């Protein structure tokens, strides 16, 4: 990553490359790594199925808008690790400036929804 981009990233995001080097440069057999990939895929599928079934459980403390905070965090992480480069795709270089603006707008909207839901929780406005 270039140094200019690293200056606006949080510390945990700057160290993400080192995390991968420390854990994946070992001399594990290729079959063992493939097994880890398969186990991660299975875990992610099960976890996503459970998360998508939560609204159907009709729990009192979980409402339909419980994904707003997750949406905000996802957009924030995508904004910090944005070095996507669309200049190699023909006619899509305009996404290099449009996508960060869209992420900022999405973060603002998600933050406003989270704040309004928190306000409703505090004052019991339904």
Image: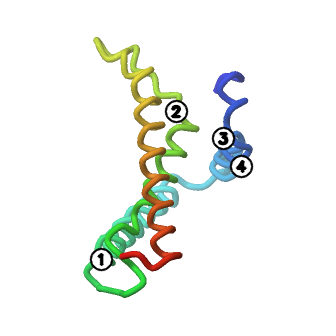
**Marks 2 and 1 close (CB-CB < 8 Å):** no
**Marks 2 and 3 close (CB-CB < 8 Å):** no
Mark sitting earlier along the chain (2/1): 1
Give me the C-alpha separation between circle 1 and circle 4. Answer: 39 Å
Give the labeled residue for mark 3: 17
Q: Position of residue 93 (x, y in %)?
A: 37, 15
Question: Which class describes the residues within 10 Å of circle 4: few (<14), some (14-19), or many (20+)?
Answer: few
Q: Position of residue 105 (x, y in %)?
A: 43, 38
Give me the C-alpha separation between circle 2 and circle 1. Answer: 31 Å
Tell me the number on the disc at residue 55: 1
Q: Nearer the viewer, residue 110 or 15?
A: 110
Q: Quadrant of the N terminus?
A: top right
Q: State which quadrant residue 49 falls in.
A: bottom left
**Marks 2 and 4 close (CB-CB < 8 Å):** no
Q: Nearer the viewer, residue 75 or 22?
A: 75
Give me the C-alpha separation between circle 2 and circle 4. Answer: 23 Å
Judge depth for marks 2 and 1 and give the one in front: 1
Give the labeled residue for mark 4: 22
Judge depth for marks 3 and 4 and give the one in front: 3
Give the labeled residue for mark 2: 82
Question: Which class describes the residues within 10 Å of circle 1: few (<14), some (14-19), or many (20+)?
Answer: some
Rendered residue at 41%/75% (across/down): 125
């Amino acid at each position: 990553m270039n140094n200019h981009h690293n200056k606006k990233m949080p510390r945990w995001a700057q160290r993400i490359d080192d995390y991968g080097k420390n854990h994946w440069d070992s001399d594990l057999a290729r079959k063992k790594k493939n097994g880890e990939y398969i186990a991660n895929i299975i875990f992610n599928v099960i976890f996503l199925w459970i998360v998508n079934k939560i609204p159907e459980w009709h729990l009192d403390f979980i409402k339909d808008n419980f994904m707003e905070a997750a949406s905000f965090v996802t957009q924030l992480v995508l904004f910090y690790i944005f070095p996507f480069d669309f200049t190699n795709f023909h006619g899509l270089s305009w996404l290099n400036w449009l996508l960060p603006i869209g992420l900022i707008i999405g973060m603002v909207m998600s933050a406003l929804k989270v704040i309004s839901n928190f306000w409703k929780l505090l004052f019991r406005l339904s």
